[in-house]
Image (spheres, grey):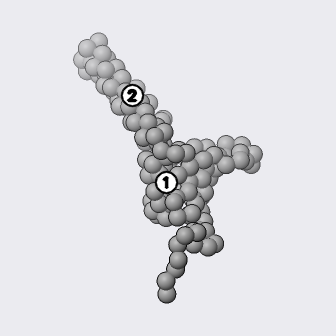
């Protein structure tokens, strides 16, 4: 949900609550707003705690992560899918609010994701040129 929509609904709840039930309605609306904000904070902390427990830039499967991504996702939505924080690539200056992250899996596949203004704009999957050492291909 957009932040503007969320704050608009909060303002509407406060106005309707105070209009319908006076100060008791305003207190009820403020209580519901505070509870909603605590839920959002708790969700963000849980996501970051899980992502921080894994090595930075690693994911179980870059191919599965690639399949689950879609344009417009926030980084907070991508972190639970990847299971870890992405390794930040060199900052790009065009446009100024662009960030790039990379995740790799044990098979050598890597996923590069570019976020513009906090939203996923494009991503690409890179597979290794050769199979990893120690594995033999059978025909």
The residue that appears at 37% across and 27% down in the rendered structure is: 38
Q: Residue 10: give x, y in percent of width and height.
A: 38, 28
Q: Residue 29: give x, y in percent of width and height.
A: 31, 22
Numbered mark located on residue 68 in the image: none
Can residue 40 be seen in this snapshot?
no
Using the rendered view, name the quadrant where residue 15 is placed. top left
* Residue at which label 1 appears: 59
The residue that appears at 52% across and 72% down in the rendered structure is: 135
60 relative position to 19: left or right: right
Mark 1 or mark 2: which is in front? 1
Mark 1 lies on a secondary structure that is: loop
22 relative position to 10: left or right: left
Residue lying farthest bottom? 139
Using the rendered view, name the quadrant where residue 23 is placed. top left
Using the rendered view, name the quadrant where residue 20 is placed. top left
Q: Nearer the viewer, residue 67 or 7?
A: 67
* Residue at which label 2 appears: 37
Can residue 130 be seen in this snapshot?
yes
Q: Nearer the viewer, residue 54 or 67?
A: 54
Mark 2 lies on a secondary structure that is: helix
Figure disc tally: 2
Distance of label 1 from label 2 (alpha carbons): 30 Å
Tell me which numbered mark, 1 or 2, is placed earlier along the sequence: 2
Where is 38 relative to 111, above or below? above
Residue lying farthest right? 93
The residue that appears at 51% across and 60% down in the rendered structure is: 106
Q: Residue 73: give x, y in percent of width and height.
A: 50, 50
Q: Residue 102: give x, y in percent of width and height.
A: 60, 53
Mark 1, Cα crowd under 10 Å, few <14 / some 14-19 / many 20+, is many
Q: Nearer the viewer, residue 137 or 80?
A: 137
Q: Quadrant of the N terminus?
A: top left
């Amino acid at each position: 949900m957009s932040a503007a929509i969320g704050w608009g609904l909060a303002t509407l709840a406060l106005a309707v609550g105070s209009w319908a039930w006076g100060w008791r309605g305003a207190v009820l609306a403020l209580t519901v707003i505070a509870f909603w904000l605590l839920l959002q904070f708790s969700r963000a902390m849980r996501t970051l705690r899980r992502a921080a427990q894994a090595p930075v830039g690693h994911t179980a499967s870059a191919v599965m992560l690639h399949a689950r991504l879609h344009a417009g996702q926030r980084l907070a939505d991508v972190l639970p899918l990847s299971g870890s924080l992405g390794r930040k690539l060199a900052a790009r200056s065009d446009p100024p609010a662009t960030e790039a992250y990379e995740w790799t899996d044990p098979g050598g596949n890597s996923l590069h994701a570019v976020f513009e203004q906090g939203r996923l704009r494009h991503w690409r999957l890179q597979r290794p040129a050769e199979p990893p050492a120690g594995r033999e291909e059978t025909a």
